[in-house]
Image (cartoon, helix red, strand yellow):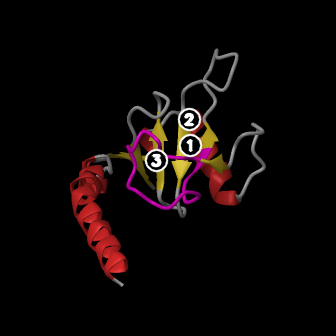
Amino acid sequence: MQLRTQARWWLFVGLLLCLPFAQARGHHSHDDAAISIVSLSGLPVEARDTFRLIKQGGPFPYSRDGIVFGNREHQLPQQPRGYYHEYTVKTPGAHNRGARRIVCGIVPECYYTGDHYQTFQRIRE
């Protein structure tokens, strides 16, 4: 019985020691208020086309459109994995998918990035 009590005590102490690290993660999560807003009309025409396809459910021109966006950069508000999905915004002159994307949670919660996830703007219709 004494061993069990000691184990619980050390578990409690270990959890207390880890608490500051768990709280420190909060500085990575992005406050939605800090993300700038862009109107749909303020986006490049290719982004408006992609947004229209997202709202109508496709079909999408790129095979990776609709894949889960992991938010590893922690630029968007923290949500469970699988909440965000990304869609390619055609970049004129690019021979690959380019750097432009629209990332959506539950539509109409969508964000535009023109620099491959470094910065985002919330899209407002």
Of 110 and 52, nearer the camera is: 110
- The residue carrying pointer 1 sits among few (fewer than 14), some (14 to 19) or many (20 or more) residues within 10 Å by Cα, namely some
- Separation (CA) of disc 2 from disc 3: 15 Å
Q: Are marks 2 and 1 in contact (CB under 8 Å)?
A: yes
Please tell me whether residue 19 is drawn above or below residue 116 in the rendered image. Answer: below
User: Which disc number belongs to residue 111?
Assistant: 3
Q: Amino acid at mark 3?
A: Tyr
- Separation (CA) of disc 1 from disc 3: 12 Å
Q: Are marks 1 and 3 in contact (CB under 8 Å)?
A: no
Residue 5 shown left or right of residue 94 in the figure: left
- The residue carrying pointer 2 sits among few (fewer than 14), some (14 to 19) or many (20 or more) residues within 10 Å by Cα, namely few
Of 33 and 58, nearer the camera is: 33
| Disc 2 target residue | 45
Q: Say which element carries label 3.
A: strand
| Disc 1 target residue | 48
Q: Amino acid at mark 2?
A: Val
Q: Magenta-highlighted stretch: main secondary structure?
A: loop
Which-is-in-front pick, marks 2 and 3?
Answer: 3
Q: Amino acid at mark 1?
A: Arg
Residue 63 shown left or right of residue 115 in the figure: right
Q: Say which element carries label 2.
A: helix
Q: Residue at x 69, y 58 (%)?
A: 56
- The residue carrying pointer 3 sits among few (fewer than 14), some (14 to 19) or many (20 or more) residues within 10 Å by Cα, namely many
Q: Residue at x 64, y 53 (%)?
A: 54
The image quadrant of residue 61 is top right
- The span picked out in magenta is 69-86
Please tell me whether residue 81 is drawn above or below residue 27 in the rendered image. Answer: below
